[in-house]
Image (cartoon, rainbow, N blue to C red):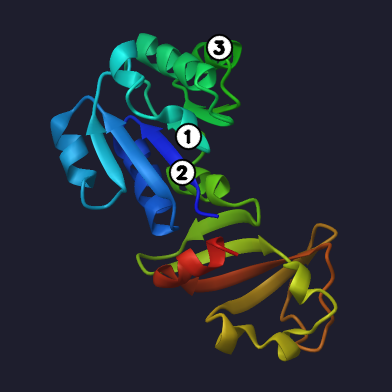
């Protein structure tokens, strides 16, 4: 099922989250008080809206209660960050991720209900986006503008099969470069080795194929 996610604050971090979520097939509502930032994403996300998150009446018209998750990427205004977090939780958003600027900000956001917080320098917006899309993806690396490396859990239908049998390069257009099992990285994975549920795969694929992987 396609996920619906709202992103508040369209600075560099929030913009990267919104774009990656859209690329992965999510319905994205992007919100900012800056007209130019909203306009820049208007043709990329599902809906881009200019709004002041401190205005309760305006916020009530956005349909936040229907969202699967919210990303609050606001750090330049503490009041806005806190009020937005409170509003999202009161509206019943199941998962609220809030960006913080320091340890004190983090503590406040956690007190008012944020489910997950992080200081942006410690975690990229792209990785946050991928974790919101699906729990099947364990990590995500941008190799170049077109190539991505992703660590994914073994799908149920892949267990007890070998890479040769699955033929993932042809069927899924992905290249398996390694596997992880019991914290050990297995390089040059034997194509006839049977995959088990406790393994993860490190794969490389083209940016344009991401939406298929994250819908699985």
* Crowd around label 1: few <14 · some 14–19 · many ≥20 (10 Å): some
- Of labels 1 and 3, earlier in sequence is 1
In this rendering, position of residue 192 left or right of residue 212: right
Residue 165: % across, % down: 74, 90
- Nearer-the-camera pick, 94 or 121: 94
Marks 3/2 in contact by CB < 8 Å: the verdict is no
Q: Is residue 125 visible?
A: yes
Q: Residue at x 66, y 88 (%)?
A: 167
Which residue is label 2 attached to? 4
The residue that disc 1 covers is 66
Looking at the image, residue 210 sits to the left or right of residue 159; the answer is left
Q: Can you give x and y, in whole percent of width and height, for residue 31 in the image? A: 30, 32
Q: Is residue 208 above or below residue 127?
A: below
SS at badge 2: strand
Report the label total: 3
**Tag on residue 152?**
none
In this figure, which residue is indicated by the disc labeled 3? 112
Q: Nearer the viewer, residue 178 or 42?
A: 42
């Amino acid at each position: 099922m396609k996920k619906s996610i709202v992103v508040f604050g369209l600075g560099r971090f929030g913009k990267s989250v919104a774009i990656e979520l859209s690329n992965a097939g999510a319905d994205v509502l992007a919100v900012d008080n800056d007209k130019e930032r909203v306009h820049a994403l208007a043709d990329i996300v599902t809906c881009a809206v200019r709004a002041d998150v401190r205005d309760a009446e305006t916020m009530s018209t956005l349909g936040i209660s229907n969202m699967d998750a919210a990303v609050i990427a606001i750090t330049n205004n503490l009041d806005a960050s806190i009020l937005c977090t409170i509003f999202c939780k009161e509206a019943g958003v199941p998962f609220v991720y809030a960006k913080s600027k320091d340890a004190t900000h983090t503590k406040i956001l956690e007190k008012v209900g944020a489910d997950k917080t992080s200081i942006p320098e410690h975690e990229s917006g792209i990785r946050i986006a991928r974790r919101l899309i699906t729990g099947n993806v364990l990590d995500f690396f941008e190799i170049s503008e077109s190539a991505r490396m992703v660590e994914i859990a073994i799908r149920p239908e892949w267990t007890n099969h070998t890479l040769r049998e699955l033929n993932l390069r042809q069927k899924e257009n992905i290249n398996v470069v390694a596997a992880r099992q019991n914290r050990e990285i297995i390089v040059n994975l034997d194509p006839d080795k049977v995959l088990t549920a406790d393994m993860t795969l490190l794969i490389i694929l083209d940016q344009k194929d991401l939406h298929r992987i994250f819908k699985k």
